[in-house]
Image: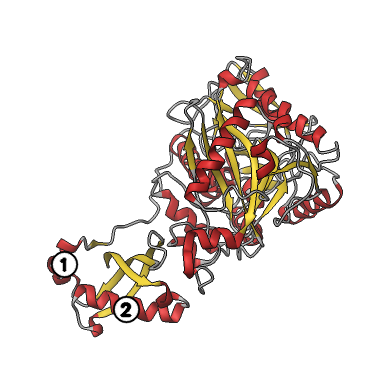
Amino acid sequence: MIRIPNLKLQIQQAKNNAIEKEALEKAIVSKLKINSKDLITFQIFKKSIDARKKNALTYVYTVDASLKNEAACLKKCAKFGITASPDLSYQAVTPGNISLEHRPVIIGLGPAGLFAGLILARNGYAPIILERGDAVDVRAAKIDTFWQTGQLDPESNVQFGEGGAGTFSDGKLTTLINDPRCRSILEAFIEAGAPDEILYLSKPHIGTDLLRETVKSLRQEIIKSGGEVRFHARVTDFLIEDDQLTGLVINEQETLSCQVALLGIGHSARDTFATLHERGVTMTPKAFSIGVRIEHPQPLINSAQYGAAAGTAGLGAADYKLSYHSPNGRSAYTFCMCPGGYVVAAASEANGVVTNGMSEHRRDGENANAALLVGVQPEDFGDSHPLAGVAFQRHWEGLAFALGGRNYQAPAQLVGDFLADRPSSHWGRVKPSYTPGLRLAQLKDCLPDYVVATMKEALLHFDQKIAGFAMADSVMTGVETRSSSPVRINRNDDHLANIAGLYPMGEGAGYAGGIMSSAVDGVKTAEKVIQRYARFSCENQAT
């Protein structure tokens, strides 16, 4: 096959699959200057939207095509950037020769744990996956109960449970990393039931509704391939002898012998961070960001981004990504933008309010929301302890809990009142989506002064980029503190911590941010295990 970049179609030429396919066939034949009969087949490799000219939006494609005489075409068209399509198949690693006395254990069934488990299971290592929370269907029911009643289960919530925190998000699969493993991960999602389009869209997403089903399918494949998944299995201690992991304590009762454990614990496993620190695992505080969720009417964002084309079939809900660098040295940015989504309660501990964003695949909610965040550094934490960032998060979450009425309602303020430094007294045009509910308050009472000051500057700056971003009755809901892990669990080039057999990975260990980068880090960590150890055999199992 050959790869053809920079094919362009007008928005109306792609309003459904049949029209898009016909238009692309004509574009390929025209670009290559070939007879239509010479085009055997083609598939989209990448599709993005060019919205720089609001009165002339276009889709931009890269396609892989199969032709009758590809060699001649490549020679003729090389000057147009047309090349042979590269091999993007997953490259398996060669197993090592050290015997495993016990099955490798994965702690956590988020993206890193899921894909580490998938790779290990497919390669004959029979991993055991320990997940402190529930299977996704039970988890979803408990989360819904929390949102409706304020009854929090600290072991099964938006942060903990099958699929990790990303399962109750927009399900974005975008990433800034350029790793060849990304494609194999997308293919695995598709095999598990995700839509084919995630393989080629420039900003792929699954949505929380579809992601829950794909997570279950991935778990079932792990089990079918020889792995084991245990729910309600919280690791409460690590048994270490002579700087070597020897076992895990589960739920303070069961001891599981273990020489290899992959830590995919997520960014909110504060109790596990503390236990690891007590057991001498080296870790350092890490920068992260805090702020609020901001909600606008989705049609406002659509019009700002797409102009008169907003609402055209196939375009869907528009998104945005904004950043601002203040003269005060701080930076603000939007994060985890959820078109047509909802602001959700994401607490994992009692007496703290945490917000996050979530969208379904159709992104058809009436509001757009995103995190509006300001970066914080370890020097802001007031302590050099490795877990000082955790204490910093808890402080602001506790203040938000108090401001919200101590019942998991969240404090909220209209943008116009926030900028004017006055309390809000009523809602405006934007109907807030957060449940269990909101309480009008001044957000400066649950955020650091420097965060408030930087957010005010950023709002006015962003309003110049997206007209209406600082509209007076947009809603800001506090607080968002779980943008990334506050801790980095140190590891070497082989992904090993200072304790032999312990492999920190994913977002919780400080090496990823989001579903895709966490999944990639899980795969890379599993590969490190495979390269060191021989495939597990039950005959080697220690008694």
Nearer to us in this view, 166 or 403: 403
Query: Which quadrant does the N terminus fall into?
Result: bottom left
Q: Earlier in the sequence, mark 1 or mark 2?
A: 2
Q: Which mark is residue 278?
A: none
From this view, report whether residue 301 is shown above or below residue 530: below
Residue 22, image quadrant: bottom left
From this view, report whether residue 533 is shown above or below residue 343: above
Q: Amino acid at mark 1?
A: Cys
Nearer to us in this view, 532 or 179: 179
Question: Percent position (x, y) of residue 450?
Answer: 60, 26
Q: Which residue is mark 1?
A: 77
* SS at circle 2: helix
Residue extending farthest to the bottom is: 37
Total labels drawn: 2
Give the crowd class for mark 2: few <14, some 14-19, many >=20 residues within 10 Å.
Answer: some
Q: Amino acid at mark 2?
A: Glu
Nearer to us in this view, 85 or 144: 144
Residue 539 in sight from this viewpoint: yes
Residue 534 in sight from this viewpoint: no
Question: Percent position (x, y) of residue 324?
Answer: 48, 38
Q: Which residue is mark 2?
A: 25
Question: Percent position (x, y) of residue 283?
Answer: 57, 21
* SS at circle 1: helix
